Amino acid sequence: MHILGISCYYHDSSATLLKDGKIVGAAEEERFTRKKHDTSFPINAINYCLKSQGITINDVDYVGFYEKPLLKFERVLSQHLEMFPLSLKTFLSSMPSWINQKSRVMRAIRKGLKYKKDVLFIEHHLAHASSSFLVSPFKKSAILTADGVGEWTTTTYGIGEDIDINLMKEVRFPHSVGLLYSTITAYLGFSVNNSEYKVMGLAPYGDMNRKTNPYYKKLESIIDIKDDGSYRLDMGYFTFHYADRMPSKKMCKLLGGPISQRDSQMTQRHKDIAAALQLITEDILTKMLNHVYKVTKCENIVMAGGCALNSAYNGKILRSTPFKNIWIQPDAGDGGTSIGVASYIYHTILGNKRNYVFRDAYLGPKYSTEEIKSFLNNNKIGYSEFNSDAELIKTTAKLIHDNHVVGWFQLGMELGPRALGARSILSNPCNQEMKEILNQKVKHREKFRPFAPVVCEDDSLKYFECDKPIPEPTDFMLMVYPIFKEWHKKIPAVTHVDGSGRLQTIRREQNPLYYDLIKEFGKLSGIPILINTSFNIRGEPIVCTPYDAYKCMMGTGIDYLVIDKFLIKRDDNPQDIWDSEKNAKD
Amino acid sequence: MSPFKQFFNGFKKGMRSFGKNIAIIIDSTLLLIVYLVGVGLTSILAKIFGKHFLESKISKKRETYWSDLNLKKKPIKAYYRQF
């Protein structure tokens, strides 16, 4: 049985194909269209999923959509009714897309895909909850979902048992911890639904002490947080329910200045505001999780929704709550809801047993050696071919050890916002200058943002103060842990200002070549850790095809590209096909 | 390309852009009417009768802001609906 899950028209459109309960293909549309956070109908992702299994849309038994569009429309209409006449501008700008696109999901599926069988719709937060619980290793688990907003719900908790999910309680729009985070993100001059993780990275530069951070009390005063973690925002400080600008004038007054301009210099004030926001978010989530534990009496917790991508907090959950085990899948934001709806249909609605745990994120397009070779030959690209995996590993490790920046293209493309060793840029974390080099050569990103380390799972406890046993979400770069002090100066390029690292752990069975490369680098440097950053430049989605990878390398300062069993040296090929500086934007 | 073809292509492009602009003006005008008459009147009436469409008030007296959801498995028919 094939089930196709679809998520689109808000942000991070995606498609997932389930075959007899197992995910056999999943990808976000942005990787194909090259538009970051693409919202359009994921026709390319769907085509990829179908093609990867050699089937057509006629072979799909059910199509599932990740939300109830008319319920969402009711909420949008309620916002306009409540906020008349302030909502005029957003009414005029948002209604055409509702009329032409968002309310015509069935038409897109029926006509766009030529699909004639059943189409099912499930609630947005149910899709989030399913995306985490039904593919988790837990038979029974507490569930917490928190994001900007779905139809009406912004936060839910409940319990999952075998194939059933019961979301018991909710917090409803306009009160949303996700939208609070997005509002301050906008206030600090970053883009909403994109740069929240930058604010998370900025926070440790600020004052992370609740007593001395001047903005903590201010932000605390505009949220009423109850002991059970439920909360409401003082809506006088927000405008997201009627305007496209999120913080109100009152918020600007509270925080002592106007909304920051894009790409403006981050001052200590900005850093303290980011820190205060992170602290408040952690307060809310901790109270909530403690309450969820009290209600469910379950030691396992699964999380989903944009807030579950707050890796800085995720690393603290098992230490600050009674939960013993945690699970989050790598695409915990809206992109992952296509997994949720497909899994919910197969298991909960149709009553099939669970037979799959999400451990392999390499669910996107992959290319055979022959396909890659013919791409290189057809485009007259100069390359050399490795005779064996051992040679590939030895040569690549040496290149990285010699401080070269290496593009790494192997296996199927990762699902979710993080590169996990299939479409990665790898470099030497022991070099003090490497952060600067990467920023200058490739990433062009804000100086305050840290780079992430990747370490073999069996080595991680030597370098990182992880929970024991190491939670599986660490494999998906979803947990930040402190780095032991003795290593701070030895791996400066991946040690954040607060001494933490957003590590990825890798197990050999997940990606043997990647694992062996890290081990080999360890033999050369004495430290089996690499910098792993996504294979893209700022403002672009992660690369998908060999063409994207080659283009990215040639337009940046990536020195080498290791693609399948081929090595391409940038200097051996005509350059400047693509001006990455020109394209680097938020 | 012949001058005639060039002119014709330019004319087609111009007409398309003109059409788009006209569509935006008409759409905006119609939406403005809908907003003022439909949304506006309903909103004013609702305000007169004290009806709120969003629960936005903070209440220090309340012990919790969690509200019941009880979202669990329903008969398959319910999932065919978009609401």
Image: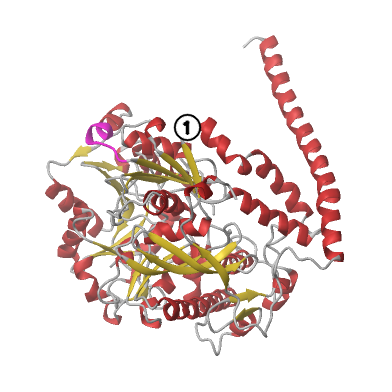
Foreground residue among A348 and A360: A348
Left or right of residue A363, residue B2 in this image: right
Name the chain letter of the residue that bears numbered label 1.
A
Q: Give the x, y percent position of residue A380.
A: 30, 29
Q: Which residue is drawn at 69% across and 62% down?
A: A241
Q: Which residue is drawn at 28% across and 67% down?
A: A430
Left or right of residue A114, residue A525 in this image: left
In this rendering, the answer to whether A5 lies above or below B25 is below
Which quarter shows the N terminus of chain A?
A: top left
Considering the whole magenta stretch, tell me its main secondary structure.
helix
Q: Which residue lies under the disc numbered 1?
A: A115
* Residue A329 seen anywhere in this rendered image of the structure: no
Mark 1 element type: loop
Q: Give the x, y percent position of residue A94.
A: 69, 48
Furthest residue to the bottom? A211
Foreground residue among A112 and B25: A112
Mark 1: which amino acid?
Answer: Tyr
Q: Which residues, given as a range, are shown in magenta?
A: A366-373
